[in-house]
Amino acid sequence: MTKSKTQSPKEYLNTLIFIHAALLIGVLLFTIFIYATGEGFLIDFTKDNNVFVYLVPTIAMLSYFISNYVFGKQLKDLTKLNSLKGKLVLYLQASVVRFAFIEGAAILSTIAYRLNNHIFYLVISLLLILYLFKLRPTKNKVISDLELKLEDQQFFQKKTRK
């Protein structure tokens, strides 16, 4: 029989930070690799007559708006919970979904760059990576996003100190 160990708020935060860092570093290294092994880049769109010109920016914008909408909707639902542990588990899940939307769009943009060597796609990919970096989880962001009550904030602060 296995015993399930409950995680502390610090462990949830560290898990979230690790997942975010892994996704960010993965897409960043992928983009760097694609750029470094490429054949330079194009700037002129007149030679570029493919669907990626419309698809990549559309997917990038949709991923930005949809990830924020889904995250906000999930946050609204989980702030109603009473249990800090329940809130943290669902916050972790909501954050991973949010990160995945942005990472997926960045990977698509990087692949479009590889196929067409057009700087436009690389710029979109880098902007999405910067946005993903901006989303990095911190203790204060978690407290703010979850709208924790004072007692939960104090418990969370106490349990996440180093």
Image: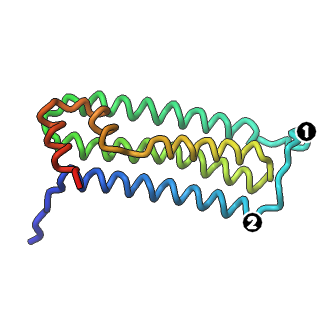
Q: Which residue appears at 24% of the width and 33% of the height?
A: 78
Residue that sits furthest to the right in the current view: 46
**Sequence-earlier tag: 2 or 1:** 2
Image x and y of residue 129, in percent: 57, 47
Q: Name the residue under label 1.
A: 46
Residues marked 2 and 1 touching at CB (< 8 Å): no
Q: Which disc number belongs to residue 132? A: none
Q: Which of marks 2 and 1 is in front?
A: 2
Give the colouring mode of the picture: rainbow
Q: Which disc number belongs to residue 37? A: 2
Report the amino acid beneath label 1. Thr
Report the amino acid beneath label 2. Thr
Q: Which residue appears at 57% of the width and 44% of the height?
A: 130
Mark 2 crowd level (few <14, some 14–19, many ≥20, 10 Å Cα)? few
Q: Which residue appears at 62% of the width and 41% of the height?
A: 127
Image x and y of residue 80, in percent: 20, 28
